[in-house]
């Protein structure tokens, strides 16, 4: 579902759902914006989840996240670049 500004609503897509999608297609978690103050343990857990999924399905998956300083989960990014699209910052659970 899209919001009025065309971005995806954070209530419809989560890091867990991105991992589910990665099991059948794609590249893994790729340049997903996360809070800039994410805990090291939470980030490590995410990377281990991606690694486990890659091992289970015997396919290469990446885990490239994009910490956004000063942001919190659910905030909208404000990138000013033709190479980046704005979205909600994802919670790392």
Image: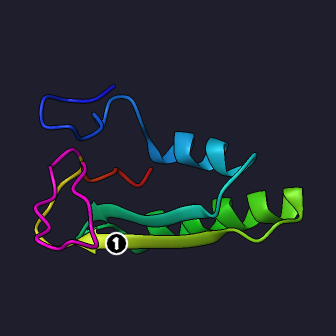
**Vertical order, 57 against 55 (above or below):** above
Viewer-closest of 3 and 68: 3
Q: How many marks?
A: 1
Q: Which residues are magenta?
A: 74-87
Residue drawn 71% across and 51% down?
Answer: 25
Estimate how packed mark 1 is, as few (under 14), some (14 to 19) or many (20 or more) residues with alpha carbons within 10 Å: some
Horizontal side of residue 20 vs 35, given as left or right: right
SS state under label 1: strand
Residue topped by disc 1: 66
Q: Is residue 24 above or below residue 6?
A: below
Residue 10 sits in quarter: top left
| Residue 73 x %, y % | 24, 50
Q: Is residue 70 left or right of residue 18?
A: left
In the image, farthest residue toward the front: 82
Across and down, in percent, residue 69 comes to 16, 73
Determine whether, in the image, residue 78 is placed left or right of residue 52.
Answer: left
Q: Any magenta on residue 81? A: yes
Q: Is residue 83 left or right of residue 18?
A: left
The reply to whether the magenta stretch includes residue 43 is no
Q: Residue at x 42, y 74 (%)?
A: 40
Which residue does the image show at 34% across and 72% down from the upper left? 66
Looking at the rendered image, the quarter that the N terminus falls into is top left
Predominant secondary structure in magenta?
A: loop
- Which residue is found at the position 66% from the left and 62% from the top? 50
- The image's colouring method is rainbow
**Residue 35 sits in quarter:** bottom left
Q: x, y percentage for residue 89? A: 26, 53
């Amino acid at each position: 579902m899209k919001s009025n500004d065309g971005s995806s609503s954070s209530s419809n897509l989560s890091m867990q759902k991105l991992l589910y999608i990665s099991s059948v297609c794609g590249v893994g978690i790729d340049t997903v914006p996360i809070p800039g103050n994410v805990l090291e343990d939470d980030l490590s857990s995410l990377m281990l989840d991606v690694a486990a999924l890659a091992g289970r399905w015997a396919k290469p998956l990446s885990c490239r996240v994009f910490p956004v300083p000063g942001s919190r989960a659910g905030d909208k990014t404000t990138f000013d670049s033709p190479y980046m699209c704005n979205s909600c910052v994802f919670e790392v659970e």
